[in-house]
Image (cartoon, rainbow, N blue to C red):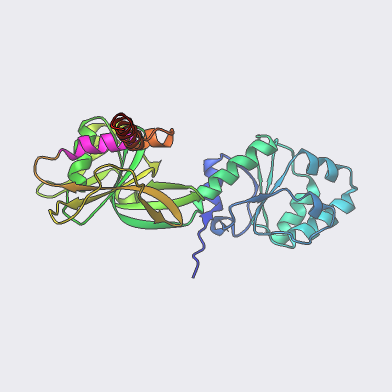
Amino acid sequence: MSVTYSIPLTTLVRDFKLEVVYASADYESIRLTVEDVARPGLQLAGYFDYYEPMRLQILGNVEVSYIQKKTPEERAAIFDRFFSYKPPALLIARNFPADEQCLEMAKKHSITVLRSGETTASLASSIIAYLRSALAPRITRHGVLVEVYGEGLLLIGDSGVGKSETALELLKRGHRLIADDAVEIRKVSDVSLIGTAPELIRNYIELRGIGIINVAKLFGMGAVRTENEINLVVNIVPWNTQEAYDRLGLEDQYMEILGVKVPVNTIPVTAGRNLAVILEVAAMNNRQRKLGYNPAQEFSDQIDRHFEMNSGKNK
């Protein structure tokens, strides 16, 4: 069963500093559920096939110019039919004034009318990006999310394995915390995951034996981030002498989260292993691989060339 996410219209108005020209009776309770917007040019002309009324409707220069060429009676009829489909709100770009017939029909059908000074294309693209992030599918995973050299590392593993303690060491080395204990992961595109902390526990770390600490206040605001893309999953496991761990890194391992494949490294821990340094190297190595350089493959090719040269000499 799919879950439908929503965002209050009032939040969008606040974040984009939109002017409320007319607030409907249910303005405070309106929620946006579609991550796209619409420019209703064809609908103003009377064509409503395949129309999606749940989208935020934006009027730009083209739509306003078309409406201004109509008589007051025609404008009233256009907006009467348009608002009868009950869109969540009408947003007018470029600070164009809302004409009398538009406001009259908005009041009749109780539709909120908003206004912005931005250009239509810029406003639409910004709102689409905003809604895609806000309405993205999401899950919450147990783990720690840190930013190391610009790479988002999601640390997972059994409780008590040392994830929070490792994050603390990384903070001391100048890296940043995004979330501890619970990571809210959103799928913002088919290839990208964004991790953040639930509002209630943001900027806090739990350390056994010490308790809860506020990272932002203890280390400064430079030690925290609100969100970050997840570039690498690090599975921290207790060292098992019976387990065969990857020593070359020739085969890429992945974990699927919300349908997105993310590279994963399994790091065994034991006394004497400096996890913070290992994770710094893992972050830099992952960045190198994204840029097309694979040291494990280079090493393997070098070994192959060495044996080929030696076999040629022995003939």
Residue 142 image point, x, y percent: 29, 56
Q: Residue furthest front?
A: 315
Closer to the camera in the image, 213 or 311: 311
Closer to the camera in the image, 126 or 195: 195
Tell me if residue 148 can be seen. no
Closer to the camera in the image, 191 or 214: 191
Circle count: 0
Residue drawn at (88%, 53%), measured in percent from left and top? 74
Tell me if residue 291 can be seen. yes
Q: Which residues are magenta?
A: 274-285
Residue 184 image point, x, y percent: 37, 52
Where does the C terminus fall, quadrant-wise? Answer: top left
Residue 259 located within the stretch drawn in magenta = no
Residue drawn at (28%, 33%), measured in percent from left and top? 175
Residue 280 located within the stretch drawn in magenta = yes
Residue 55 image point, x, y percent: 65, 55
Q: Is residue 289 left or right of residue 223?
A: right
Q: Is residue 6 above or below residue 207?
A: below
Can you tell which quarter of the image residue 97 is in? top right
